[in-house]
Amino acid sequence: MTDTRMSDCTLCPRECHVNRLGGERGYCRETAELVAARAALHMWEETCISGKRGSGTVFFSGCNMGCIFCQNHSISSAKAGKVITAERLAQIFLELQEQGAGNINLVTPTHYVLQIIEAIELARKWGMSLPVVYNTGGYEKTETLRMLRGYVDIYLPDFKYMDEELARACSNAPDYPFYAKQALAEMYAQTGGFKIDARTGMLRSGIIVRHLVLPGHVKDSREVIRYLYETYGDEIMISIMSQYTPVPRVSGHPLLGRKVTKREYAKVVDYALEIGVECGFIQEGGAALESFIPEFDGTGV
């Protein structure tokens, strides 16, 4: 990767201005080298993403958010992963297609946008025909997202917080709500309303916004759901997630040190139904399962 935009990196809202080409590391903890920790069929996404065959999921190392409760800490902190080339990434896409993947699912891709575009171009040239899913924490710049027009079919962003102080406390990103709103607007401008293949039930294009309910923060969850529905109605799908799992880093935290209660989650879901949300997903039963957190052991990379 020789793109000069990596020599003064401002790809995400952190705008670290580090020379990643020269080996410097900013908030995402990654240089210009492309690092992936796992590439495999994943069955634990929303049903229209995973389907019956699985989503061809590539987990990238590093992250521009650094949430204190992160369940994928081994890769988000850049402690796991293997250096690969854009050419190898393109080959991985094709291998996942051959395995029967319903799509190519790029997890935590923000800081690798330039390399990913190069890989998608190569993979399409070599025969990849699957839709591409951009699976992100939602902390994005519209200028970066615009580079992805024509490359990404499905956006799968989080909308983590509406409260700036909660965003500061959990992710050191008080501007998260601002950027998440701007990012979602750009994603919608690119994709419009969602389109589902009537034959397979798989999402072909559009947006699913994920919101992870945090313990003790039902009010903020309601504000997120309200904003999403008032702004986009049923043009996007909303996935309300209950799988929050306390990690050692938040042990003893007055709120984040415990799981979300059934009552807390039910309050958020009931509110979504009350205001009219019809297009989306909820999680039933015990959602905080190990199945949601795969082994980041280099499989498929």
Image (spheres, rainbow, N blue to C red):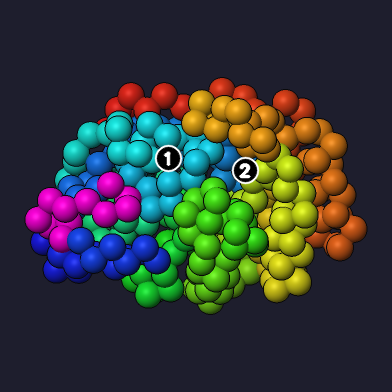
Q: Label 1, on which residue?
A: 57
Q: Quadrant of the N terminus?
A: bottom left
- Of 297 and 76, the residue lying toward us: 76
Residue at 81%, 33% (x, y): give it: 262
Q: Residue at x 30, y 31 (%)?
A: 80
Q: Earlier in the sequence, mark 2 or mark 1?
A: 2
Q: Calculate the distance from the C-alpha at mark 2 to the C-alpha at mark 1.
A: 13 Å
Q: How many other residues sit within 10 Å of disc 1, few (<14), some (14-19) or many (≥20)?
A: many
* Residue 88 seen in render: no
Q: Name the outermost residue toward the right.
A: 274
Residue 220, given in percent of the width and then of the height, sits at 72, 56
Residue 98 is situated, as x and y percent measured from the top left of the image, at: 36, 37
Q: Main SS of the magenta segment?
A: loop
The front one of 128 and 56 is 56
Position above or below: 114 against 28:
below
Residue 27 covered by magenta stretch: yes
Check disc 2 and report the residue beneath it: 46
Give 47 or 222, whichever is nearer the viewer.
222
Residue 147 visible in the snapshot: yes
Q: Is residue 208 above or below residue 107?
A: below
Which residue is found at the position 64% from the left and 45% from the top?
Answer: 212
User: What's the residue type where badge 1 is placed?
Assistant: Thr
Q: Secondary structure at mark 1?
A: strand
Q: Residue at x 19, y 67 (%)?
A: 8
At which x and y percent is residue 182?
Answer: 53, 73
In this orientation, which residue lies closer to the viewer: 258 or 157? Answer: 258
- The image quadrant of residue 208 is bottom right
- Whether residue 145 sits left or right of residue 224 in the image: it is left
For the record, the magenta segment spans 19-29
Q: Is residue 34 above or below residue 142?
A: above
Percent of width and height locating residue 37: 32, 34
